[in-house]
Image (cartoon, grey):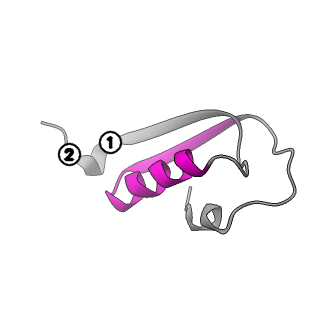
């Protein structure tokens, strides 16, 4: 059995942050709340200038 304290989750996204990524952001926040270490890899820089407030809650 795995301990959540030793698990890391990586997200590879085309762009991050992105205004339309509500589902992904909610998933990331749920993983962080569960104590998982999150690493986000964006293949491209953000193209948008405005983002949802929920993105600021992500600590990764």
Q: Residue at x 49, y 54 (%)?
A: 26
Q: Quadrant of residue 40?
A: top right
Residue linked to disc 2: 3
Q: Position of residue 57 (x, y in %)?
A: 56, 67
* Tag 2 near tag 1, CB within 8 Å: yes
**Crowd class of label 2 (few under 14; some 14 to 19; many from 20; radius 10 Å):** few
**Crowd class of label 1 (few under 14; some 14 to 19; many from 20; radius 10 Å):** few
Relative to residue 27, is residue 12 drawn left or right? right
15 up-or-down from 58: above or below: above
Q: Position of residue 60 (x, y in %)?
A: 56, 55
43 up-or-down from 57: above or below: above
Whether the magenta-drawn stretch holds residue 12 is answered as: no
Q: Residue at x 37, y 61 (%)?
A: 33
Whether the magenta-drawn stretch holds residue 36 is answered as: yes
**In this orientation, which residue lies closer to the viewer: 25 or 37?**
25
Q: Position of residue 59 (x, y in %)?
A: 55, 62
Which mark is drawn over residue 7? 1
Q: Quadrant of the N terminus?
A: top left
Q: Position of residue 15 (x, y in %)?
A: 74, 38
Which mark is drawn over residue 29? none
Residue range in magenta is: 22-42
Q: Residue at x 53, y 44 (%)?
A: 39
Cα distance in 3D space between marks 2 and 1:
7 Å
């Amino acid at each position: 059995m795995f301990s959540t304290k030793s698990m890391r989750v990586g997200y590879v996204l085309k762009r991050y942050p992105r205004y339309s990524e509500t589902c992904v952001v909610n998933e990331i926040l749920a993983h962080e709340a569960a104590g998982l270490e999150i690493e986000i890899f964006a293949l491209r820089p953000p193209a948008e200038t405005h983002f949802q407030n929920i993105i600021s809650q992500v600590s990764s």
